Amino acid sequence: MTFKGKNSGAAGFTLIESLIAMFFLFYIVGQMGSIFIYASRNTNLSQRITRANQLAEEAVEKSRNTAYNNLQQANGLLGESGAAAASHTSTIAGKFTRVRTVSPLPTGTALVSSNQSDVDVVVSFTDARGNAQTIRVASVVSRY
């Protein structure tokens, strides 16, 4: 005669096995949540960088389409202040600060004439963590 215990044919998990399985499940779900938060922050930063690039390119293009003699003056289309200065600042949507600086290129080489100016646009913003970010676009504008 063989002895069989009460649980010899019982199927299922013990309490310890269930607790360990739940621990691993909660750990995996927690890690996935942190991945989603990280991805969301990066998406937000990418959107802000893209918008800053658009704002900088817009200022350069409008400078290219402005009469050469009027480059130093603030362009009302860009919402800039500093009418007679070489550097013009505008704030867009309360999030971005755009500074457009126009300066004549130094002459003295065969490649640079007195009819050329450097247009430098810097767009600054703060990311979700409060860090300052800067995008810079520059171009040469000619009188011709």
Image (tube, helix red, strand yellow):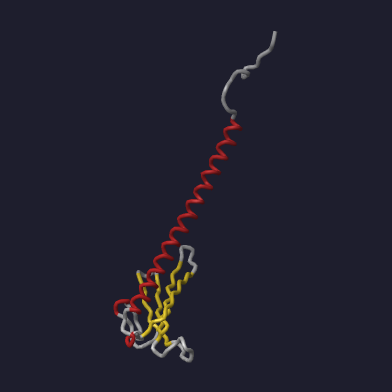
User: Could you tell me residue 54's position as x and y percent?
Assistant: 38, 69
Q: Using the image, determine if residue 122 lies above or below residue 30.
A: below
Q: Between 142 and 12, which is closer to the camera in this rendering?
A: 142
Q: Using the image, determine if residue 52 lies above or below residue 80.
A: above
User: Could you tell me residue 66's position as x and y percent?
Assistant: 31, 81
At 34% across and 81% down in the image, what residue appears?
81
Toward the left, the furthest residue is 76
Q: Using the image, determine if residue 44 lies above or below residue 57.
A: above
Q: Between 9 and 65, which is closer to the camera in this rendering?
A: 65
Toward the top, the furthest residue is 1
The quadrant in which residue 52 appears is bottom left
Q: Between 5 and 28, which is closer to the camera in this rendering?
A: 28
At 62% across and 17% down in the image, what residue appears?
6
At 49% across and 67% down in the image, what residue appears?
131
Q: Quadrant of the N terminus?
A: top right
Q: Using the image, determine if residue 113 lies above or below residue 18.
A: below
Toward the right, the furthest residue is 1
User: Could you tell me residue 33's position as x and y percent?
Assistant: 49, 49
The quadrant in which residue 125 appears is bottom left
Q: Is residue 1 left or right of residue 28?
A: right
At 57% across and 33% down in the image, what residue appears?
18
Q: Between 22 and 110, which is closer to the camera in this rendering?
A: 110
